[in-house]
Amino acid sequence: MSAGVAAGQGPEPDAPLISFEQVVRLHGTGAAAVAALDRVDLSIEPSEFVAIMGPSGSGKSTCLNIIGCLDLPSQGRYRFNGVDVGSLDGIGRARLRRAHIGFIFQGFRLLKRTSALENVEMPLLYRGVDRQARRAAASAALAAVGLEDRRSHLPEELSGGQQQRVAIARAIVTKPSLVIADEPTGALDSAAGEQIVDLLRRLNQTAGTTIVMVTHDAAVAGQARRIIRFRDGRIASRPSEPDCDDAH
Ligand SMILES: Nc1ncnc2c1ncn2[C@@H]1O[C@H](COP(=O)(O)OP(=O)(O)OP(=O)(O)O)[C@@H](O)[C@H]1O
Ligand SMILES: [Mg+2]
């Protein structure tokens, strides 16, 4: 892991991979401002598998977008592997993302007229990896998700579960230290969803990849080693905290 090196700062050996200190994310201004995240403290260690749950609008995707360096806190500090992400410019954040973070979304987000293999090669193309090395790495990533025999298929020729497996191969082809997934099983039936979460769990166990996954599905979340629950932009103080507002 060398996020600090890539960002031109020294990584701290004992730092958590992800650290939020009093992170606030406001949308809108003045009286109309809404705090999508409200003074969130959060720490995730390398090789953790964490599920984020909570009602619609509670701040889950906002939190994941900040973790993935796609968005920035309005206040507070986010450190990735000891690096203050707020101190990086857009290019520095893009470099950090490309080097260390893989993304998986509910809607797969594959390129339509592009084969499975070429979709998986795409992050390596951005990194300037040569064609032969791209092919080899993308083939290995497709094999890791059990789709070596579908490499020439277009996304529309694949089932939803297969498309999400291609998206996982694309997310892991760069061997990222962190994979973030926003509702990765949300568009799939339960059998296909189970396969996806199995793959994520295996990735966490075999490669030690840190995984942070948002899900509404308690069975999917149950596969993670830790569940963080959001409510109104804040983390519920205890995992066992009752799920209703009128608990007192
Ligand atoms: N770009 C934006 N502009 C204004 N408000 C936003 C924006 N993005 C999010 N919000 C608000 O921030 C809050 C948190 O949104 P977020 O998308 O993080 O919720 P979520 O927990 O992911 O919900 P869901 O389960 O429906 O995906 C919501 O009240 C939402 O309306
Ligand atoms: Mg969301």
Image (tube, rainbow, N blue to C red):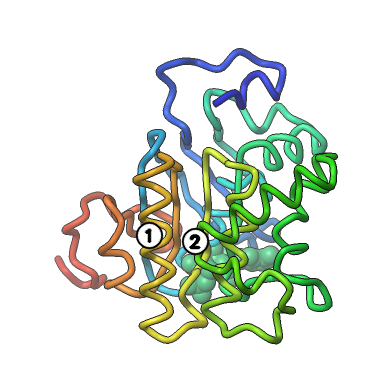
Mark 2: give few (<14), some (14-19) or many (20+) Cα within 10 Å: many
Instruction: Confirm or deny contact between disc 2 and disc 1 (CB under 8 A).
Output: yes
Instruction: Tell which of 66 and 180 is nearer to you.
Output: 180
Under tag 1, what secondary structure? strand
Name the residue carrying label 1. Answer: 230
- The residue tagged 2 is 59
Q: Can you tell me whether the CB of the residue at mark 2 lies under 8 Å from the nearest atom of ligand 1?
A: yes
Closer to the camera, 233 or 108? 108
Residue 201 bears which disc, if any?
none
Inspect the image, locate mark 2, and give the three-letter code of the amino acid beneath it.
Gly
**Residue 220 position within the rendered picture, expressed as x and y whole percent measured from the top left:** 33, 69
Q: Earlier in the sequence, mark 2 or mark 1?
A: 2
Instruction: Say which quarter of the image contains residue 163.
Output: bottom right
- Residue visible at 48% across and 78% down in the picture: 186
Q: For this rendering, which residue is in front, 52 or 110?
A: 110
**Quarter of the image with the C terminus in it:** bottom left
Q: In this rendering, would 65 be left or right of 17?
A: right
